[in-house]
């Protein structure tokens, strides 16, 4: 694997590009045109990627049109111990778990907060205990509008919980509060067992929204990206 490489996380909502030189991120973007320009200007030849959305992957391949090799990473068996059926773990979760265990980030809960929210629990021996999946914040907001005739579709806001004095505010605050309390409660499921030794990692587009509500959380929006790079180096080193 080259010292300079491109890493891409293809999600349901957006694609996250990161360009590395050794272990340093030189440039990161969610915008395809900016990524293509950087690829062309700097002579990158490969993208190491994971994808949870086949349609988004196909669209990307069409846009790049052979200008760079896209190497889609697949799951390897038995690279960590899990009580979960690893064939059913999404590749994004799989990479997060792998990266946490490889770097001794345990006991821990890895919270990836995006279109869907995932919570993965790793014990003090580095064994993946399993996880939880819930709707993400934007997904919750959209579902209320889809399921009702009179309630509006709202965009989530980063704000404190207040009492709504109109329907739109009451709805927005209610959904935001429900999402926030779920994340807080699920982050603490191993607290009684591990107390101060539990590491809580928050990643994904909505992780920043909870940083003021969980005192010991470590926000790392590049956690999955760094995991992809590490995984590619270990298993796709050419």
Image: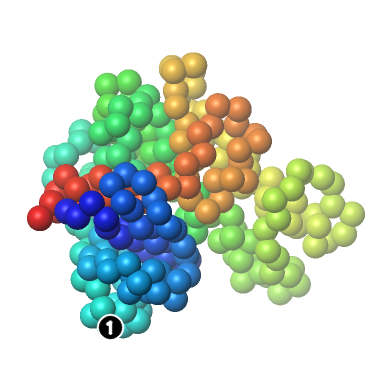
x, y percent for residue 98:
27, 40
* Circle 1 SS class: loop
Depth order, front residue of 87/12: 12
Q: Is residue 88 visible?
A: no
Depth order, front residue of 62/52: 62
**Residue that sits furthest to the left in the current view:** 238
x, y percent for residue 170:
80, 55
Left or right of 208? Residue 30 is left
What's the residue at 53%, 32% (across, down)?
A: 217
What's the residue at 55%, 27% (across, down)?
A: 216
Depth order, front residue of 17/203: 17
**Residue that sits furthest to the right in the current view:** 165
Left or right of 73? Residue 62 is right
x, y percent for residue 166:
87, 59
Left or right of 178? Residue 5 is left
Asked if residue 158 is positioned above or below residue 35 in the image, the reply reads: above
x, y percent for residue 221:
47, 47
Asked if residue 176 is positioned above or below residue 14 in the image, the reply reads: above
* Residue annotated with mark 1: 65
């Amino acid at each position: 694997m080259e010292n300079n490489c491109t890493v891409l996380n293809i999600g349901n909502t957006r694609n996250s590009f990161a360009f590395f030189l050794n272990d340093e991120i030189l440039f990161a973007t969610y915008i395809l045109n900016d990524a293509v320009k950087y690829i062309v200007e700097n002579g990158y030849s490969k993208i190491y990627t994971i994808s949870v959305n086949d349609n988004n992957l196909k669209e990307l391949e069409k846009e790049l049109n052979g200008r760079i090799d896209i190497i889609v990473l697949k799951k390897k068996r038995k690279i960590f111990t899990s009580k979960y059926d690893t064939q059913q773990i999404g590749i994004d979760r799989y990479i997060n778990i792998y990266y946490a265990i490889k770097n001794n980030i345990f006991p821990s809960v890895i919270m990836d907060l995006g279109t869907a929210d995932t919570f993965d629990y790793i014990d003090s021996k580095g064994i993946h205990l399993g996880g939880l999946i819930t709707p993400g914040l934007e997904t919750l907001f959209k579902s209320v509008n889809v399921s009702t005739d009179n309630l509006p579709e709202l965009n989530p806001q980063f704000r404190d919980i207040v009492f709504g004095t109109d329907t739109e505010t009451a709805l927005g605050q209610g959904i935001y509060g429900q999402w926030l309390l779920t994340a807080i409660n699920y982050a603490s499921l191993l607290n009684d067992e591990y107390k101060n030794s539990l590491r809580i990692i928050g990643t994904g587009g909505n992780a920043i929204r909870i940083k003021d509500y969980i005192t010991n959380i470590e926000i790392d929006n590049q956690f999955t990206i760094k995991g992809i790079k590490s995984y590619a180096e270990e298993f796709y080193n050419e």
